[in-house]
Image (spheres, rainbow, N blue to C red):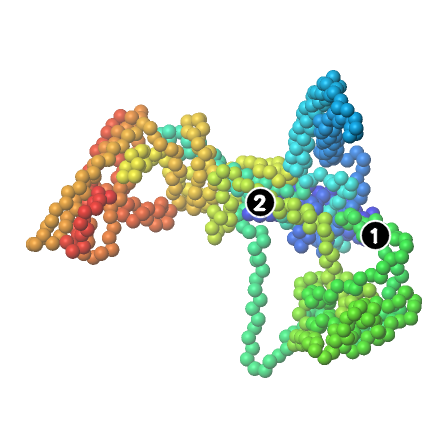
Amino acid sequence: MTAGTAQRWGSTLDSVVVYAQGAVCRRLARGSVPPDGRVRVTGLPRSLDPGSLRARVLGAAGVRVTEVRVEIEAEPQGTGAPDALRREAERLREEYAAARGRRDRQQVLIQEVQGLRPVPPARKREDPHRRTAVDAWLELADFVDGRLTTLHARLVELEEALVRVEHDLGVAEDRLARASTDAPSAHVTATVCAVLTLDVSGTLTDAGDAEAEVELEYGVPGAVWVPAYRLTHRQGDGTGRLVLRASVAQRTGEDWTGVRIALATADLRRRTDLSKLRSLRIGRRQPAPAPSGWREPPAGLADLFAGYAAAGPRPATTAMPGAGAAGAVSGAVSGPVPPPPPPPPAPQAPRGYGAPPVSPPPAAALPVPGGAYGGPSPAPARPGARPGAQPGGDARSFAGAPAAMAPGAPGQAPPPPSPPPAAGPPQPSGAELDYAALVLCGPDEQAGRRGRLFPDSPFDPVAAEYRRRAEAVAALPLPGHAVRPRESAGSFDHRFDAAARADIPSDGTWHTITVGEIPVGLRTEYLCVPSVEQTVYATLVLANATDQALLAGPVEVTVDDDFLLTAALPTLAPGGVRRVGLGPAEGIRVTRRTHLQESASGLRNHTTVLDHRVHVELANRLARPVTVEVHERVPVTSEPDVRVEERADWTAPEAGAGHEHHAPGTRVWRVDLPAGGTAALDGGYEIRIPAGKALVGGNRRS
C-alpha cells in the first residue's frame, strides 16, 4: 500500500486528558470505507508515541478495526508556507551581523587615526640642529582632532543602530521560541498518518460503501498542569464560590483548539501491566511450553550465504544519508571510496524471531574484508587469529609490533570463554511476536542475523528531537504557590473535567483555563496566639463537602468584590477542613498579661508549686459580630513526679482525620464578640515539682 492508493480521511482533535506529565489525545475521523478497507488518517502530531496509538469505530455496526500503523510522510514545503517569524529572525540576524561589522570597522578606523604621530626625519651626525616645525605639528593635531570628532559621532550612530537591531533580534527570537510548534519546519513538511485496516461485514459491502466514524487515541509527551483557584466571599455569608482553574503548558507539536480538556493527577508513565503468576507443579520437571506461533530456524541457514560471503564486498558505491524525517535524497559518490567499516557487534536483545539464544559470534564467523568485488576471495581465518586480520598482515597493520601481541602467544592472556547458551526454549518478547513489524535481515547483516526476522525499530532522530523539545516543558518554573499535582495528590488519583472547551497553543508557556465551580462551606474566623504575638489574624475556614479532593495551589481571595490577596491553599481531602489566612485584622485588639507565684507545699515543703496566671482581653472594633479563637499552651511533662494542674475553661483542640495538627499542650478559647464588644479571659495552671528536681533561679515565666 502506498500513499496514493490509500483513501485519506481528515481528522479533528476532540478531547485531551492532561496527566501529571504527558497527555492522551483523542481524534475523530469520518468517511466512507473503501472496498479494500485501507484508510489513511492524517493530522497526527510528530511527537506522538507510536506504541500508544489505538483506534476504534464509533456507532457503525458491522465495521471494525483490524490493524493500525503509524507512517510518516515528508514533502517539500511550498514557497508560500507561513514561516514569517523564522524569516524575520533570520533577516534580523543578518542585519545584526552587518551592523556589528560596521561598528567594528569604525573602531578600527578610529584606532588608526589615533595612531597618527609626527615623525621627524633622520638626522646625520654631521648635520646641524634643526628647529622643530611647530606649525606642521599643530596642523597635524588639528587634523587628528577634527577627524576623530567626525569618526566618534559616526561611531555613536552605529552603536545606537546596533542596539536597536539587537533589541529587535531579541524580540524576534523570543517570539520564535514562544511560537506554536504546530507550524511546519523551514524546508520539509512532515505529516504523521495513522494507516487503518477496516473490516466490513458482507451485508454492508453488498449495499455499497459504508460510512464510519473512527476514534484515534494516542499519547504525547510535553504537557503539564498545576491547579489554581479563585475564591469569592462576602462578609457575614456562610458560603462562597470556589472556582477551580488550571495552568496548562504544552509543547506537543499541535495546537489544542476548541477541545474538551480533562485534568488528571495520575502518572502516565507508571506501569499498569499485571505480573504473570506461573503455576507450581509437583512431580517431574517439565519443559516450558513454546510460545504460540514459534518456529525453529531451518537447518543449514548459515550455509545459504556462504557463496555471498566468498564473493567479497560489494562495489564501492555509497549513497548519501537522508536528510529528512521520512524520505531521503540519495546520490552516487564519484571517485575512490574507502571500504565500508566493519559492522557493529550484534545486539544481544531483541533476538530474531525463531532464533535460540546465541552467544557472541566467534572470530571466524565475523566478515573478513577482502579485495574488490569479484576478485579472489580472502583466505579463511586461521584459528586464534584476530578478527579481520589478513595473512601476514600483522607487520603491515602494526609496524614494529612484537609477534607476542597475537592471541594465544606466550605471555598473552587467553581470551575469555563465551558464555554457555541459556537452557530451555527461547522466550520471545512482545515485539518479536508482532509479526507485521518483523523484517527479514539480508545478506549484508552479521552472521548471526542473516536470514532471520527482527523487529523493525529504526532510530528516528527527528522524532527524538521533537520528543526532547516537548519534554522541556517539565522544567518550566511554576507560578507562585503552585504545587505539582503528583506531590499534592498523595497516593490517590483524581480527575477534573472542564465545563467548556478551551484553546491551548503549543508554545510551551502557561495558559490558564477555567475547570468549574466547586461548592464549599465557608466561614470567617479570627485566630490569635497572644503568647507569641499580640495580633489577631483573619482566616477563612473551608470545608470540602464534595467527593473530590482539592489539590494544593494558589488561591486568589476576593472579599466583598475587592481583591484581597493570593494565598496558598493546602490539599483538602473530601470532608476535610482547612484554614486560609487573610492577614492581620486591624479592627480587633488583644492584650495578654501573665502572673507567676512560686511557693512550697507538703509536710516538709518538699514540693515546689509554680502558679501561672494568664489574663487575655479582647476588643472588637468592627461593625459586625465576630468569633475569635485564642490559642494558649500548657506545659507537657513525661516525668511521673511532675504534675500540671489546669485551672481554666479552655478546651483541647480536636484531633484526627480532617482536623488541623496542633502542638502538644495546645488549649483553645472560642469567644463570640458582638459589634463593639469586649471580653476578658482568665486561665492558668500549676506546676508541682519535687524539691529535688526543681531548678534554682532561671526564667520561670516561659
Q: Which residue is mark 1?
A: 320
Percent position (x, y) of residue 414?
70, 77
Element at label 1: loop
Q: Is residue 225 left or right of residue 144?
A: left
Q: Quadrant of the C terminus?
A: top left
Q: What residue is drawn where x is 20% and y is 38%?
A: 594
Q: What residue is drawn where x is 81% and y is 37%?
A: 78
Element at label 2: helix
Q: Is residue 226 left or right of residue 437?
A: left
Q: Please, which residue is most extreme toward the top here? A: 135
| In front of the other: 627 or 96 | 96
Give me the disc on residue 475: 2
Give the vertical position of 284 relative to 640 (above or below).
below
Percent position (x, y) of residue 447?
78, 69
Give the vertical position of 507 relative to 216 (above or below).
above
Q: What residue is drawn where x is 73% and y is 47%?
A: 192
Q: Please, which residue is most extreme toward the left here? A: 603
Percent position (x, y) of residue 288?
63, 75
Tell me if mark 2 has few (under 14), some (14-19) or many (20+) residues whose alpha carbon lies within 10 angstroms of its own: few
| Three-letter code for the amino acid on which mark 1 is drawn | Met
